[in-house]
Image (cartoon, rainbow, N blue to C red):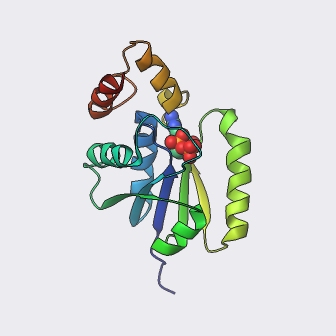
Amino acid sequence: MANKKMVALYPGSFDPVTNGHLDIAERAFRICDELHIAVVANPSKSSLFSVEERVELLKQTTKHLPKVNVTSFNGLLVDYARQIGANLIFRGLRAVSDFEYEFQMALINRNLYDGIEVVFLVPNEKFIFLSSSSIKEVAKLGGDVSGFVPPEVEKALRRAF
Ligand code: ADP
């Protein structure tokens, strides 16, 4: 039987994209045949950057990964996965704090759509404690975030605060 094409979806808030996200995106890219990075447009979660700005920052910072498609979606993750023909969802796992939530969501998503597998990737240990919210906090207080985010994001954060 021919090998099935691996079409993957890497979803998240990406508010904004950090070096931790990019580390996961690069690992995901090496594993699958086609990678879609998608900003979850969830109106109930307040964000610093608009969906369009987050998509644009992701596009700029993943330019080195050929054929990565950056988009956004509303609604259920599994519906979007089905719509684009994804058979794999990538999520990043940081320190233990991510585990319980991610484990629960993975099981729920697989119950909703059994055509999908959720795969967890572990970042380089230097990014294990990195989150968009901590970056925003540091940037807001005037701290240097250049080691944590790509230059395009650093600029956008400077403009935002
Ligand atoms: P969400 O609101 O969906 O959790 P995030 O933008 O915070 O969106 O994260 C998107 C995905 O990237 C999640 O799987 C998250 O665990 C992962 N991620 C975020 N930051 C890091 C990091 N520093 N290292 C590895 N994975 C990360």
At a point 47% along the width and 63% down the height, the residue shown is: 8
Residue at 55%, 27% (x, y): give it.
Answer: 129
Residue reaching furthest to the bottom: 1
Is 74 or 60 nearer to us in this picture?
A: 74
Q: Is residue 55 above or below residue 19?
A: below
Picture quadrant where residue 139 is located: top left
Q: Hey, which quadrant is residue 78 in on the image? A: bottom right
Tally of marks:
0
Residue 22 x, y percent position in the rendering: 40, 42
Give the image location of residue 54, x and y in percent. Answer: 38, 44
Residue 110 location, x and y as percent?
A: 69, 66
Please tell me whether residue 10 is drawn above or below residue 94 in the rendered image.
below
Say whether residue 10 is visible: yes
Can residue 87 be seen in this snapshot?
A: no
Is residue 3 found left or right of 96 in the rendered image? left
> What residue sits 40% from the left and 13% below the top?
143
Locate the C terminus and report the quarter of the image it occupies: top left
Nearer the observer, 74 or 59:
74
